[in-house]
Image (cartoon, grey):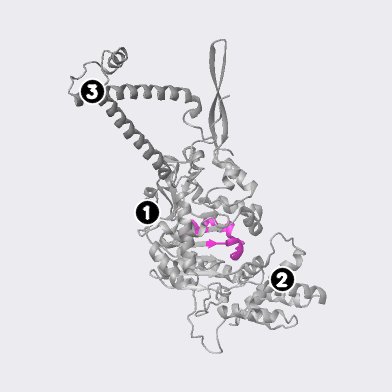
Amino acid sequence: MTANNRRPEPGRLARRESWLLVGLLCVALATVGLVWVSVQAGNALAGLDPVRDDPFVLLIHLAQGKVAWTSWSTAVAAAIAVVLTVAAAVAVRARPQRRRGRSRVDRAASYMGRGRDIDDLTLRTAQEKARRLGVAATPGVPIGRSVATGERLWGSWEDMHIDIWGPRTGKTTSRAVPAILGAPGAVLVTSNKRDVADATRDVRAKSGPVWVFDPQRIALEEPGWWWNPLSYVTDEVKAQHLAEHFVAASARPGARSSDPHFEDSGRDLLAGMLLAAALDGRPITAAYTWLTKPTNEEPADIVRDHGIHLTADQMVGFASLPDRERGSVYSTARRYASCLTNRQIARWVTPHGDGPDPRPQFRPDDFVLSGGTLYSLSKEGQGTAGPLVTALTVAVVEAAEELASRSAGGRLATPLLGVLDEAANVCRWAELPNLYSHYGSRGIVLMTILQGWSQGVEVWGEHGMRKLWSAANIRVYGGGVNDDGFLETLSKVIGDYDRMTSSTSSGRGHRSVSAQLHRERILDVSELASLPKGRAVVLASGSRPTLVRTEPWMSGPQAAEVAASIAAHDPHAEHTIREAQTELVAVETAAGSEEAVLGNPHEGRAS
């Protein structure tokens, strides 16, 4: 639906002639004043009597020669002219400085949300909600500053976020890092790059233990701790959920299912193997070993010995299929679990040696209470650690949900923040759209960051992506996307404004001006596609769309701490920090050189 955001008054062009008349009148009055001051000051300096005439009469008498214009009057007039010229030059020169930080799209802010339209996003509202929820440390998740009013906007500790930012538009510096720095409790982060971990880990270490899950050495982290994914598998339902993470991660973008029967059977078979390994205290790699031996009845026997007969029967049924069909089912299951064959990955999810592992074991329940930070890193694509990143993310969130159910009011006393950066690449959580709105009431605040609408569709389908978008209370678009369908919808939601144009006609000594009203988009598709860095569009439940100026960590109060953390962990720290400073300058100037279009580029021309 297209919003109708009407302009409060006609456009400038309709009033251009009136302003021209006002300007000419001001010039005339200024000239009269200059002459009067020059004559009076000149007479005083020449030792002559002051002129008693008012300024207009004096001008007439000066023209008639009744009042003398002395050389002192000329000197005074020249001095005043010099002063005014210098003042005008300074004002013109200072104008770009005042415009610094302005963007070519900022004119749209006056037609978008401001004042009461965005009251739910203000600091006052966020603080009130935080006090009600018993969270005193910070009011909420920072979003940015309103371009229209300069007021800082926040998401509360009940709001769920979804962000769409194209590549290199500042999503990490302006959204992920500030949110992590301000979190009052445990923080869960996913990414396919090390930058967010390098920037925040030392700052977050002051709040609790820091865990970096890096099975593919994105951050060159050694496995100084381990996590047992099978600790999540307590029954056949949890085994199915874990298997689904492997299935989702193995899906090829845009690929169609070759045979849903084999894919579903492969998932069920993998779930059975995972369940057997969990019940028998085996490492998760045992599930893959069993998948290479279709005639091995050991896993089915383990499941049956624990009283789960139907799942055991299902596993026996798969092993008893005709050779060709059985081979397809088992090969499908092996494809899903192929990442377990990577020894580097296995070191993070299996114990070392035959005896007790001396390394600390990550336990989601303890983590939620610790106030610490977990960074889960993985590359994208098949055979990566993506399934395990998703499984670890889900294990932490579900542990938080279970703790919330045992807490007062059914929510965590201190919220858990989950920043799911690159969610479509490394955390393909199939059930996320169905659960999103539920977590806000539990004190589990998630921020899902995508590079485009179509990226979300690849994971959750069109219906699922729409469901995820609708379930979020805070929706942020940071530019850099060229998806016409998404941008057209976004443009419609932002709404229209009414533009007044005028046309002039003359003839036979008669001159007339007519005005026409046109309705146009506040931000059209091309403007949204080329949204300047440093600007973002925010759509929040119950509020009108608003344009914000983003606030990267480089301009925040913890900039020095973040820079120190980068210097301590990033092997290319100097380049990273230099790049961050360059980005900050770009954000602050924000197309400041485009002075010609900072007015209203949509104004019509008189014809």
Q: Residue at x 78, y 77 (%)?
A: 320
- Give the vertical position of 94 relative to 513 (above or below): below
Say which label, 2 or 3, has the lower sequence index: 3
In the rendering, at what x and y percent does residue 223 appear? Answer: 52, 79
In the rendering, at what x and y percent does residue 140 appear? Answer: 41, 55
Quarter of the rendering containing residue 237:
bottom right
Task: Give the distance between the C-alpha atoms of the residues marked 3 and 1, in whole angstroms.
Answer: 69 Å
Task: Give the distance between the C-alpha atoms of the residues marked 2 and 1, in whole angstroms.
Answer: 48 Å
Q: Residue at x 53, y 62 (%)?
A: 420
Are the residues at dot 2 and dot 3 in contact (C-beta closer than 8 Å)?
A: no
Nearer to the camera, 463 or 425 = 425
In the rendering, at what x and y percent does residue 186 appear? Answer: 44, 66
The disc placed on residue 88 is none
Say which label, 3 or 1, has the lower sequence index: 3
Single out the residue that lies furthest toward the front: 71
Q: On the rendered structure, is 44 left or right of 389?
A: left
Q: Which region shows up in magenta?
A: 420-447
Dot 1 amino acid type: Arg
- Give the vertical position of 381 relative to 123 (above or below): below
Is residue 271 on the magenta stretch? no
Task: Give the distance between the C-alpha atoms of the residues marked 2 and 3, in whole angstroms.
Answer: 100 Å
Q: On the rendered structure, is 255 left or right of 279?
A: right
Q: Which residue is mark 2?
A: 266
Q: Which residue is mark 1?
A: 132
Q: Which residue is mark 3?
A: 40
Q: Residues within 10 Å of mark 1 (few under 14, many from 20)?
A: few
In the rendering, at what x and y percent does residue 18 appear? Answer: 45, 22
Which image quarter is the C terminus in?
Answer: top right
Nearer to the camera, 111 or 543 = 111
